[in-house]
Structures are given as structure tokens and as C-alpha cells.
Image (cartoon, rainbow, N blue to C red):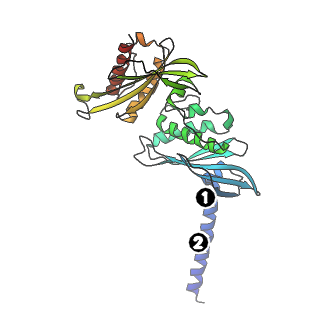
Amino acid sequence: MSRENRNILINLGVAIVLSLLFLLVFRTFNPSPEKILFSDGDSYKSVNFTKYTYVTDKIEVKKDGKVIGYIYEASGKNDYSNDKNVEVIIGISKSGRITGIEVKSLPQSDFVLKDLYNNIQSFKGKLIDNIDLAELNSDVRVPKYDINSGATVGSSLVRKMLREAIFIHKGLEPVSRTSYEVIYGDGATTEVDSSFVGNANVTKKEAVKINDVVVGYAYTVTSKRSSSDVAGFYYGTVEWNLTLLVGLDTEGKIKGISIEDSEHTKGFINDHLAYFETLVDQPIASYDTVENTVTGATFSKKHIDDLLQALKGVLA
């Protein structure tokens, strides 16, 4: 063998050794997301499960041949992901403790990723039996789970993914709560009041019951509103529909408000969910308007106000 060929082989061998060392160091300091969730796992295998909305894969994690937990891969879109999927993986031990949530893809701004990551870290180490599943299904900020307030849309999506993973982990079907249950509590049922005389905007009245006891009345209010009266409105002249479900208690105080249908930009209209909270316990008869600190959603705020005034007028 010539000296030149021998040098080539030596250099090739050195390159291979260096590459293996680099790969070993990289894996040591940059473990896979699966290893972050279960560092002691030595086997990761997809298993069958019933698919619903977000969870796309259930991975069984074993150590020394014994199952120590599961990793749930989840994917979904939100208003700011530009029609691309937000992807996360969720680790839950066999005993029901959350080992962590890792973001695999977040097609949004970097500062959102930072806030979102801080929020999802609040779940690490918690037992799933101690998690409020109703609050995981909320579209508004949940302070006890959301450390930062700058990533509500992304955090609420991940919370819903976690909620579904918990249901699957427990072998339960992740049934969504109805708007009536969100406003009045679990087990709320309704009965249409056929004697109610409404109008074009207030279209339905329902008695709401829990354990056959009437706890309030829910009204469906709806209308189309033109943007033509909004000077300099970005979208020009548009007719936008909005339908709300307004829940009142038996004394006529607001119990809660749910957006049932909307042609408004979702990001804007959802900004008002926090505003609805400020209206709880306010009598509909004395409703005027409450200062809404939401910015950039003036048109939808006025539409909401119109509907609440219409309900107030019908019940006067």
C-alpha cells in the first residue's frame, strides 16, 4: 500500500472516530425529546389507541421490559399558526404523573415560544388526578397554569392537548362540555320555553336545570352588524354575524356568556372572553356597558354590546 493511500485511510479513520465522538457528545448534551420526558426509558414503541382531536400517537415507554409511562404526540392549529400545526409531546408516567411537555413545532413568533414554554412547565411533576380538566378546556388565560400572559392562544391549545392525553391515559373518552355546563356547571340540562316571545335578535329562551331543579335561563341572541359605520375600518364594509348564549340565574344576573357562532376574526372575538368574566353577577336589567380594556377589537365589542342591549330590552 502506498504511503498516500495509507494516509487517506488514516485520515478517514480519524474522521470516523471524531464523528462518533461528536455524535456521542451531541446526544449527551442534546437528548431527544423522548429522553427528556423519560430519561431512564430504554424502549419506545407506538401502541394502538382511540384517536380523537389532537393526540396523533401514543408511545409506550419501557425500562428493563416494564412499562414506566406513555408519551402522547399531539398536533393542532390555532389562529396564529398560519394554518400550520403546533406539535408537542406529553409525558405521563404509569402512576399518572406528568413528566413534562416538549414543543416540537410552534410556527409562531419566538417570544411566544418563550412564554408558552414557561407556561407548560407549570404542569411538570403534577398528578393528572389533581388537574382541573374543565380549566384545561378554557380559551382564556388560566393564571394557576399560565405563568406568563403573552401566549394565551398557544397555551390554551396545548392545555386542550394535555386534557385529551389525560383522558386517553385514563382510558376515558374526552367528551367536550356543553356551553350550558361551562356556564352553569356539570350536569346542566335544558328545556326550551315554547311560550317565550322574542324578536329577530333574541331568538330562544331555555330553562336550565341541574338535578331537575331550575337554576337559570339561557337566551340565544344573534344579529348581523355592518362595519360601514366604523370610520377607517380595515376590512371595508362587511356584514358579520355573531350569536351568543347568555346565561342568567333565576334572579336575572349574568352567570356567563358563550360565543356560539361568529364571523368576526377569531383572535379578536376571543379577546372578549375575559370581558365576559367582568359581567358575571351583573343584573341584565341594569346592564349599560362595562369598560373593556381589550384593544384592537372595537367593532366586535360594539356588536356584543348591541346584543346584550337587545336582550335587556326584551326582558324589560
Residue 266 at least partly seen: yes
The answer to whether the residue labelled 1 contacts the one labelled 2, judged by CB atoms less than 8 Å apart, is no
Which mark is in front, 1 or 2?
1
Q: Secondary structure at mark 2?
A: helix
Q: Position of residue 210 (x, y in %)?
A: 58, 22
Q: Position of residue 112 (x, y in %)?
A: 47, 39
Of 12 and 315, nearer the camera is 315
Q: Amino acid at mark 2?
A: Ala
Residue 126 at least partly seen: no
Q: Amino acid at mark 1?
A: Phe
Q: How many marks?
A: 2
Residue linked to disc 1: 26
Residue at the location (62% across, 51% down)? 49
Instruction: Name the residue furthest front.
Output: 195
Up-down: is 238 above or below 165? above
Q: Position of residue 203 (x, y in %)?
A: 37, 24
Up-down: is 285 above or below 3? above
Up-down: is 139 above or below 32? above
Up-down: is 210 above or below 82? above
From the image, which quarter does the N terminus lie in? bottom right
- Answer few, some or many: residues within 10 Å of disc 2's Cα (few below 14, many 20 plus, some between 14 and 19): few
Residue at the location (46% across, 40% down)? 111
Residue at the location (63% across, 50% down)? 71
Q: Secondary structure at mark 1?
A: helix
Instruction: Name the residue furthest bottom.
Output: 1
Earlier sequence position, callout 1 versus callout 2: 2
